[in-house]
């Protein structure tokens, strides 16, 4: 898959990856899948709260977090049957061809170029949707009256958009990050 793949191509690649390499999650019910993804989002918010704890290079640490979180956002969108590109068109009127073009259009943030500032910005931006999604899943567990699906859809899209903006701030290619991460995960699998 090329670096400049369309968002739907990334979603298809994620679907195939999940079906092949994450059967334990892929074969569960949709609510269980979404609960799993929400836990991942919370984990990534926690990862962003730390300032490079493993003494990794800050850029590599943030790129890994962005790619991991984007992979889960793709899986979440797939579970919800959301066409990310179509959603961005409806939400913002943006009709870019690639994640990088869309990210440039979405990025209305004043210039932030220091890696630690980008990490802090992304931490602040992801905390709310991750919390909203956790609240929705808890409401589902308690059978409380709440628009769970609508919340999950909206917050999944907010996460995708925040990740695109952060990748634009870093001047990195989402397709490249995802391809590298998929290959790494798939090489670790014995099947």
Image (cartoon, grey):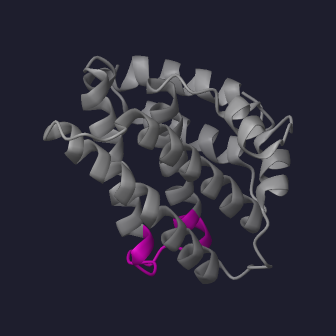
Number of numbered callouts drawn: 0
- As displayed, is residue 88 above or below residue 57? above
The verdict on residue 54 being magenta is yes
- The picture places residue 81, in percent across and down from the top left corner, at 52, 22
Q: Looking at this view, name the residue that lies furthest to the front.
A: 145
- The picture places residue 128, in percent across and down from the top left corner, at 44, 63
Q: Is residue 185 left or right of residue 70?
A: left
Specify start and end residues of the magenta stretch as a single range.
Answer: 48-62
The verdict on residue 149 being magenta is no
Q: Residue at x 45, y 78 (%)?
A: 52
Q: Is residue 182 left or right of residue 88?
A: left
Q: Nearer the viewer, residue 127 or 25?
A: 127
Q: Residue at x 49, y 37 (%)?
A: 153
Q: Where does the N terminus fall, quadrant-wise? A: top right
In which quadrant of the rendered view does residue 54 lie?
bottom left
- The picture places residue 114, in percent across and down from the top left corner, at 69, 82
- As displayed, is residue 26 above or below residue 149? above
Q: Can see residue 39?
A: no
Q: Is residue 36 left or right of residue 101?
A: left
- The picture places residue 174, in percent across and down from the top left corner, at 69, 47
- As displayed, is residue 16 above or below residue 25? above
Q: Can see residue 86?
A: yes
């Amino acid at each position: 898959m090329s670096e400049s793949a369309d968002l739907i191509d990334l979603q298809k690649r994620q679907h195939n990856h999940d079906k092949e390499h994450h059967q334990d999650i892929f074969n569960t019910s949709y609510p269980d899948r979404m609960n799993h993804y929400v836990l991942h989002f919370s984990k990534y918010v926690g990862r962003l709260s730390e300032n490079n704890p493993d003494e990794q290079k800050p850029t590599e640490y943030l790129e890994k977090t962005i790619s991991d979180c984007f992979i889960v956002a793709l899986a979440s969108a797939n579970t919800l049957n959301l066409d990310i590109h179509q959603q961005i068109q409806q939400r913002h009127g943006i009709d870019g061809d690639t994640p990088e073009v869309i990210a440039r259009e979405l990025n209305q943030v004043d210039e932030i170029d220091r890696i630690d500032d980008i990490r802090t910005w992304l931490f602040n931006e992801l905390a709310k949707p991750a919390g909203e999604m956790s609240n929705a899943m808890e409401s589902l567990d308690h059978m409380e009256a709440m628009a769970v699906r609508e919340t999950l859809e909206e917050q999944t899209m907010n996460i995708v958009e925040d990740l695109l903006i952060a990748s634009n701030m870093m001047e990195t290619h989402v397709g490249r990050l995802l391809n590298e991460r998929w290959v790494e995960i798939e090489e670790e699998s014995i099947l």
